[in-house]
Each structure stands twice: as C-alpha cells, then as structure tokens.
Amino acid sequence: MSATAVADSDERAARDDFRASVRRFVEREIAPHVATWDEAGTFPRELYAKAAEAGLLALGYPEHLGGTLASMAWRLIVSDEVARAGSGGLLASLFSHSIGLPPIVAAGSAALQRRVVPDVLAGRKIAALAITEPGAGSDVARIACRARRDGDAWVIDGEKTFITSGVRADWLTVAVRTSGISLIAVPGDASGLERTPLAKMGWWCSDTARLSFSSCRVPADHLIGDENAGFRAIMANFNGERLLMSASACAFAAVCLDEATEWARNRTTFGQRLVEHQVVRHKLVDMRMRVRGARAWLEALVDRFDAGPLDAEAVADLCLLKNHATQAMQFCADHAVQILGGSGYVRGTKSERIYREVKVMMIGGGSEEIMKELAARQLGL
Ligand SMILES: Cc1cc2nc3c(=O)[nH]c(=O)nc-3n(C[C@H](O)[C@H](O)[C@H](O)COP(=O)(O)OP(=O)(O)OC[C@H]3O[C@@H](n4cnc5c(N)ncnc54)[C@H](O)[C@@H]3O)c2cc1C
C-alpha cells in the first residue's frame, strides 16, 4: 500500500472511531430526552459542557483557543450523528456557536478571542449570531440596528429577531449599522439589552429570541475586525452555515427514511405488510433516491470546502445544495408521515417532529428564493 493509501485508511479508521463515540454519546445523553425537551421548550444547559467533554463543540477551531483542528468531514460526523436523535431544535441551539464564533475567530482581536472562544468551546458559555432584524432578513444590507462610538464604548440601539440561543447566549455576535455594517461582540448581560423568547412551529426546544437594544453600552474593543467590514464577514460566515444546514437536512431526510422503512416492514394492512404494497415501497425508494443524491452532492462539496476558499461556482453549488438537501428533507418528512399514518401525525415519532421542522431549514440561513438568486448571480446568469 502506498503512503497516501495508508494515511487515507488511518484517517478513515480514526473517523469511524470518532463516529462510534459520538453515536454512543447521542444515544446516552440526547436521544432518550429529546421528546421531553421539545415538549418543555428547552434542554438543560449542562448539555453544552457534556457535549464539549465528548469532543463535539471544539472541532475545527484553533488549538490555542481550546479547539481541535479538524476538517469539515469531521464536523459533519457530529451533525450526522446528533441529527439521528431527530431534533433540529437541539442541533440549532447546541451548535449556535458554529455561526456565532467564526467571525470572532477570523477577525476578532487576540484579547477578544481569548475572552470569548475558550469558554464557549468548553461548554461553559453559549454563543449566538444576531443578524436578522424585523425590517432586514434576506436583505442584510438594510440592517438598521445602530451603533455609535461614545468614548471608550459602542452604544447600540435597535432590534434583532429570530435569534437562535438569543435568550441564553453569554456572547452575541451582533451586526450593527455604523456607517457601513460592523460586527460587535455583545455580552448577554449587557445593560440595555432585553431578550424575549419567541414561540415557533418547530424547533421547540431551541431558544429563539427577539433582542431589544436600548442605549446598550459595550466596550470599544468588542468590535470584531475593522469598522464597516461586517458585510463581507457575514457573507463569508454564511458558507459554513449553509454547508452545515445542508448536512443536517440530509441527515434528517435519512432519519425519516429509516423510520418509515422500519414501520412499513412491521405494519400490516389488508393481510400484507405495508412494504409489500407497491405504492408504499415506491415511496420508500423515491425517498432513498433523494437521500442518496443529496448525500453524494454534499460529500463532493465537503471535499471542495476543505480544499480552500470557494470560487463563484462552488458558492453557487453550495446555495443549490442547500435547496436540494432541504427539499429532500421535506419530501422524506412528508412521505414518512404519510407511511406512518395516524402514528405519524400524533406526537412521539421523529418524522412528526422533522415534518414540523423542515420549513425553518428552507427559510433560515438564506431562504430558497435567495439561494437561487445568489447561485444565478455567482454563475453570471
Ligand atoms: C427558528 C429560526 C431561527 C433563526 N435563527 C437565526 C439566527 O440565529 N440568527 C439570525 O441572524 N437569524 C436567524 N433567523 C432568521 C432567518 O435567517 C431569516 O428568517 C431569513 O433569513 C429570512 O428573512 P425574513 O424572515 O426576514 O424573510 P424576508 O427576507 O422578509 O423574506 C420573506 C419571503 O420573501 C422571499 N424573498 C425575499 N426577498 C426576495 C427576492 N428578492 N426575491 C424573491 N423572493 C424574495 C424570501 O425568500 C421569503 O420567502 C432564524 C429564523 C428562524 C425562523
């Protein structure tokens, strides 16, 4: 075997071991509780520390900040395995740092990075990203939440909405209007910041909040990167978010397929198992076709992601993958609930929950329509 082949097989074995350990963690600490947590509308804060202890939170972050160097392929193992518990809400809040931290890691001062990042990666603190406003969602350039400099502080006034981990976050990476757009790290307990929980169609155990800033003062050195350089940082951050969302959409589609397949193998109607009715088994293979297609595309893009900065064509592919994967998830959730019949409609199955959670995947992190526009623009159409 060549040295490269040995390295490849070592890497595969190491990834398999890691996958098995994440699976054990999810089966022990998450899967048995997600239904209860969803009904309760929250999950225990201690889960962050447990997830950190199991090596789930720090992957892909610099070692000097408490991270573990890892390619995107390793990070996808985590989203795959956590998704097997069948709760997008859990995934969104437990990993809200995956959208909140990267701008700080990429552009924050060394002092700010040390203040924020190690505690979050250790699960002692929670990080979130606050871009969306009541008047600015898809149209990020319309951000109106204003920050003005006053001596050694930034003073923030305005609103943010739909913010994941918004109530519990200890650190919020907030997009503000200076003369352009800037990013500021705001402590969750800053004076002048009010946080209100929002009720939702799905993602029940995820903390989603409206934030209100009223003369909220934050030390000047909490600016992330240069003043007015925020727009580019926000756009770059979207790439990672969209890849991770595509990965979890693929995983949730597969969860629905597995649940429906098992049900169809065991449930009998008219003297036959469901799977023996042609209509039902055709639904299952149609689901599999979408799961396999989305997954293959995802894996190709993961390799592209790890190879270095994305060019315009790769960004376009990423946008279209997000649409493709979330449509696969929607198709599979719909078919799974149908195959489960009444049992798919009452609470208690993963498919029922995933059915309620699919729309946010098609809206958040760049809606389907915006993904098409962005892809078309990147392709020069
Ligand atoms: C549960 C949840 C969690 C979220 N978490 C976060 C978070 O942590 N941080 C954060 O910053 N944001 C978060 N969001 C916000 C999310 O990213 C936005 O909802 C999303 O970007 C869409 O913005 P909007 O809701 O303002 O819709 P709008 O921008 O008002 O769009 C409404 C509809 O019009 C369509 N549309 C808009 N413009 C065009 C156009 N030019 N052409 C065609 N169609 C168009 C959109 O596709 C959409 O279908 C979250 C949202 C939800 C629901």
Image: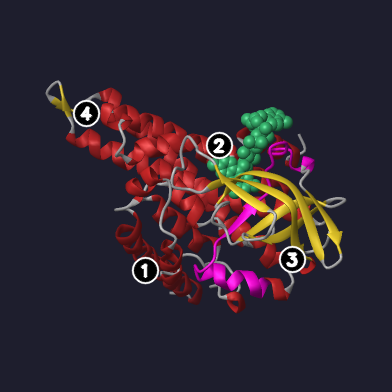
Q: Nearer the viewer, mark 3 or mark 1?
A: 3
Q: Is residue 94 left or right of residue 112?
A: left
Nearer the observer, 81 or 176: 176
Residue 328 shows in this picture: no
Q: Residue furthest bottom?
A: 64
SS class, disc 2: helix
- Across and down, in percent, residue 106 comes to 70, 65
Q: What's under tag 1, amino acid-wise? A: Asp
Give me the disc on residue 274. Answer: 4
Where is residue 318 drawn, in percent x and y? 62, 46
Residue 320 lies in what quarter of the image?
top right
* Quarter of the image where one finds residue 333: top left
Q: Percent position (x, y) of residue 87?
A: 41, 47
The residues bearing labels 4 and 3 have C-alpha atoms spaced at a distance of 59 Å
Kindly identify which residue carries mark 2.
362
Task: Check disc 3 and report the residue beneath it.
Answer: 222
Q: In 3D space, how far apart are the residues under numbered discs 3 and 1 (Cα atoms)?
A: 39 Å
Q: In the image, which disc is placed on residue 304?
A: none
Number of residues whose C-alpha sits closer than 10 Å to that of mark 4, classed few (under 14), some (14–19) or many (20 or more): many
Chain part drawn in magenta? 113-142
Disc nearest the viewer among 2 and 1: 2
Query: Is residue 134 a member of the stretch shown in magenta?
Result: yes
Q: Can residue 50 be seen at all in this image of the molecule?
A: yes
Direction top: furthest residue: 270
